[in-house]
Image: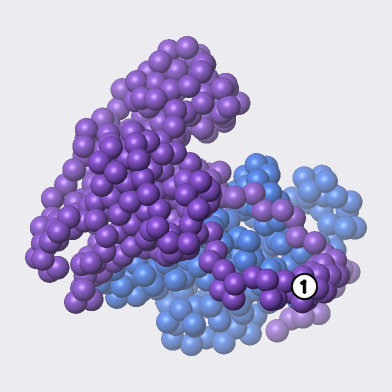
Chain colours: A purple, B blue
Amino acid sequence: MKDQDTLMSENDDDIARLMELAGPRAEPPAAARERVYQAVLQRWEQTPFIKPQASHQRRWMALAASVLLGLGIGYLTLNQLPADAPGVSGNIVFASGGYSIRGSQDISAPQLQEGAMLRTSGKGRLLIQLDEYTTLRLDHNTSITLQSSSEIWLHSGRLYADSINGAGIRIETPFATITDVGTQFEVTANGETLKVTVREGGVEVKLLGNQVLTATAQAGMGERLTILGANEVQRDTLATTDPSWSWTQGARDAYDLEANSLHDFLFWATRESGLRLRFTSDAVRIASDSTKPCCGKVLDPRQAIDDVLATSDFFALDGQAYELLIDFRR
Amino acid sequence: MHHREDYQLVQRVLQKNRKAFEDFFEIYFARLFRFCSARVSQSDAVEDIVQETLFKATRSLASYRGEASLFTWLCQICRNEISNWYQRSGRKSEMLVSLDENPDLISTLESLQVDFDDEVDRLTAAKLVQLTLDYLPDRYGRALEMKYLEGLSIEEIAGRLNSGAIATQSLLARARRAFRSAFREVQKDLETAT
């Protein structure tokens, strides 16, 4: 191997020849680049902000300090804390109607401890924030146990999970385990029947006999699995904008337009409506991110899309029924 | 070896720096696309695999420590995605490049003392060289292309890179050494892929 290539030498015949014969690197198709760019950008915008890491030396000093502090606190509190105090599994951010909590839980506290058992009443609905990107909505007469922020036991009733970043939450039911893969989906458990309906992305459903099924949503249609008596499976589809999803709108607060950009509003409203958001170009998307929508708070996301766009320089192009394609008035 | 520039880019992406994200995408999308295209023949599948790779990378960037180059790290994710795709699609893994038709290039490659085995024999030289360039730091790859493909003088390259003539000569010397070394990495990578 020619390792003697120095600043003064022009020992480059081999590389020159190779490069000439190989030619320039092939560029991927522009359309593919644009599609992937938009998709990855959207995901990146949903990822959490990470603080810069300290240098190695500062990290070690911080680690040493925290160990000493931990030992001190541990010594002082060892005999005062329960040996296995439960962690926090989520927060209730919206409640309507009535609900009850069982377990070692103070009902007046919005923070839910691991192991908390919740039951909504015949008119009750709840929205629980499990982590920054994952929420859980409970419909009327639903009973769950929050084992942790990523493991939920659904005893009966209906829940809707919205996991923007593919957090991998697991829903345990008497007949199956449902794991999300970055998605919106609904699970209904009633007696001998379990229904899993996907609105975005995909889920894996593992039946009691270890059979694994998948259900996905594409082009505005989501798959629905109906599992009868643990192993009889029926499969059909449901539109992501079907009115039967509308119960989820009763389990959240109004959206504050003034606290968010037009881009964020459109992202929220399309996600709530089962639509896919697209922009005609990155420039339009960026412009929407620096535009403030008007005005106040909204409840109905589908109606609000029309109202908000009408008061902005942006508009929706005619396109697929399952997507909202945004352009800028030039 | 710590890949400081890659690590710093990742840190800025994690801090939601838009320019850093654009740089990250600009540098690595095309490289991953070529990496994947050399292993999967369906172009729509290539797009899906690269997108999924970047999704996973975006979610896992915080775990990047700079111990390998960022491209090597991304290739590892991409390789897993390719393997998953082959499993799901029930197809047999394939390498899509072949050297058989170009004896000139084979002899040139041999002058680099590349050990040819059955797998490398099936590579086309063009793709092998392009994959090698992808493994280099962006600045090295661009400098080599400017010199040997565009035929620019040292002064012209220096002008484009906002650098001095001596520094550019030094950069090219380092780029050539890195090219030869990366050639072996590509070989190794292809061997482990089979």
Placement of A83 over or under A330, stated as above or below: below
Question: Of the residues shown, which amino acid type is indicated by label 1?
Answer: Leu
Residue A298 seen in this snapshot: yes
Left or right of residue B149, residue A213 in this image: left
x, y percentage for residue B114?
A: 60, 83
Identify the secondary structure beneath mark 1: helix
Which chain is disc 1 placed on?
A: A
Placement of B21 over or under A88, stated as above or below: above
Report the residue marked by disc 1.
A76
Residue A37 seen in this snapshot: no
Residue found at x 72% / y 71%:
A77
> Which quarter of the figure is the C terminus of chain B placed in?
bottom left
Count all numbered tags in the image, as a single digit: 1
Residue found at the far top of this picture: A311
Placement of A138 over or under B90, stated as above or below: above
Residue found at x 69% / y 76%:
A79
User: Of residues B122 and B9, which is closer to you in this image?
Assistant: B9
User: Of residues A220 and A225, which is closer to you in this image?
Assistant: A225
Within-10-Å neighbours for mark 1: few <14, some 14–19, many 20+: few
